[in-house]
Every structure is written in structure tokens, then in C-alpha cells.
Amino acid sequence: MRTPQTATPAIEVQGLEKGFGELEVLRGVDFEVARGSIFALLGSNGAGKTTAVRILSTLLKADAGTARVGGFDVAAQPGQVREAISPTGQFAAADEVLTGRENLILVAKLRHLKNPGAIADDLLARFSLTDAGGRKAATYSGGMRRRLDIAMSLIGNPSVIFLDEPTTGLDPEARIEVWQTVKDLAQRGTTVLLTTQYLGEAEELADRIAILHQGRILQSGTLTELKQLLPPAKVEYVEKHPSLEEVFLALVGDNGTNGAAGTDTTSNDK
């Protein structure tokens, strides 16, 4: 695990509440995210994860409570918050008609940055997409699209990045690719707030985890601290019957030359 920078938290949330009509989505949420760390907001569908991220991204207004990102109040200083963050949604936002490089150049131009081509080439190299940079994004695998999406989010060097369910719909190999990308972000000093419903994802990536359920934080802490909430499991002897595979291997031996009854020793199969 990384050692997060000891300074004012990158994200501070206190008493956050949000409802839609009679539906209470967030009911007094509190948490802090240290600078340069990966923080996982873990919860099932409907727990309120995306709503919390939308409030922190200034896309929604909270009904009550306060939230600060990068030292700025999301309600009173939304412009400064937007300059400090980059949100990435559940699905890749790359334009599939454009090439990977063209997508990056487009975002750099929209941010009015100098040398957009150089910025694009640097990010393609950083995310191991240089060889695919000239191909249309529509031809990319799921993992490649996600890496391109995250690369686009980093244009302008935001200090905080929100990853909302970043591996939804990805196969195991692509998921591992994205995990490595997220780890690299934190190693470079970027603060990452990750929302996920995958227990293994939070366990693999997060420095700290908060469990959000029905709009409330049930518990938060490091993985070790959370595991200590339950007593260790007792290991008991359970009788296990041999499988057919085990019977077969025991009969034929490791090299298959035991001459067990019923074995066709004249076979030419190798």
C-alpha cells in the first residue's frame, strides 16, 4: 500500500443528504479521502454511490451537509472544484468514430491547452496505447477503451479523479488492466475516489474502504481494520470424497504406465 500524503484531505464529506421525492438516497454520509490515496466507496446497486460522486462533481446539489474537494466547497466554489477534478462515468466516453489519438487531442483542445498533439502522444505512451493510437476507438477492446477513457480524464492534470464503477462489463483480463492503471495513478500522486460493487476490486486497490448501504456509511477503514470486525473463521475437518480425476490418476500413476486393469496398453494416443 502507498503512504498517502499527510495534509488537508483531498475530499471531506460531512452529513451529506440527498433525496429524490420520497426516496432518501443519501442519509448523512461522512468520509474523508487522503491526498494521493485510493478510496473505495463500496456498495450494492442503489446504495447511493453514484449520487455521492455526482454531488462531489458539482453535477447535483445536496439537500444537506457539506463537501469539500481539493480544499474547495462544492456548493460555494463549484468552478474551483471542477478545475481540480475529473470524473469518469460507468461507461467509456470516447468517440468511437475518432482514433484514440484524435480523442485525446480533442479533449486537450477543449481545455485550451498548448501542444495538444504532444499531450496526446505522452498519454498514449503512458497508457501503453501508442501502437493503437492511430486506430478508431471503435476497434479497441473493453480494457483499451477504459484506459483511453481514463487517459482523457487526466488531461489538464486534475488532482482528484472520480472513477464510477470503472470495470463494469469488462472481462477479467481487461479488469486487471484497469486495476493496474488505477494503481499507477495513485503512485503518481493522483487522489482516486473509486465507486464499486465488486468486493475483490476494493480489496485489490483501496487504501481505505467505506461500505455504503441504503444511503449510510456502515463502516470505513483499511482492509485490515474491516477484517478485524469479524472473528477469525474456525477450520474444521470435513471428510472429502475423491473425485473421478483423483481416482483415475491414482490408478494410472503419474506417467500413465501402471498398467491398471482396463487400461489399453496398445493405444497409440500420446
Image (tube, rainbow, N blue to C red):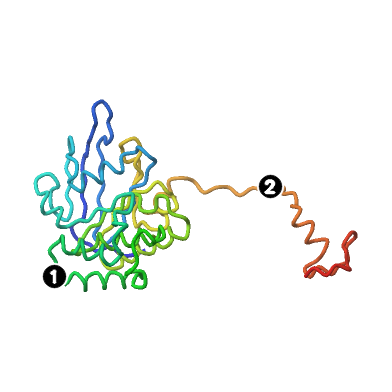
Give whichever of 136, 242 is nearer the camera.
136
In the orientation shown, which residue stands out farthest toward the left? 76
User: Pointers 2 and 1 in contact (CB under 8 A)?
Assistant: no
| Left or right position of 218 against 109 | right
* Residue at the image point whose x is 32% and y is 52% from the top: 194
- On the image, numbered disc 2 is attached to which residue? 238
- On the image, numbered disc 1 is attached to which residue? 114
| Left or right position of 94 against 112 | right
User: How many angstroms separate mark 2 from mark 1 (CA)?
Assistant: 66 Å
In the orientation shown, which residue stands out farthest toward the front? 97
Q: Is 214 rendered above or below residue 270?
A: above
Identified by mark 1, the residue type is Lys
- Residue 204 x, y percent position in the rendering: 42, 58
Among numbered discs 2 and 1, the one appearing first in the sequence: 1
* Residue at the image point whose x is 33% and y is 65% from the top: 2
Q: Is 135 rendered above or below residue 209?
A: below
Quadrant where the N terminus is found in the figure? bottom left
Q: Nearer the viewer, mark 2 or mark 1?
A: 1
* Residue at the image point whose x is 26% and y is 53% from the top: 33
Quarter of the image holding residue 160? bottom left
Quadrant where the C terminus is found in the figure? bottom right
Q: Could you say whether the residue bearing mark 1 is in a helix, strand or loop?
A: loop
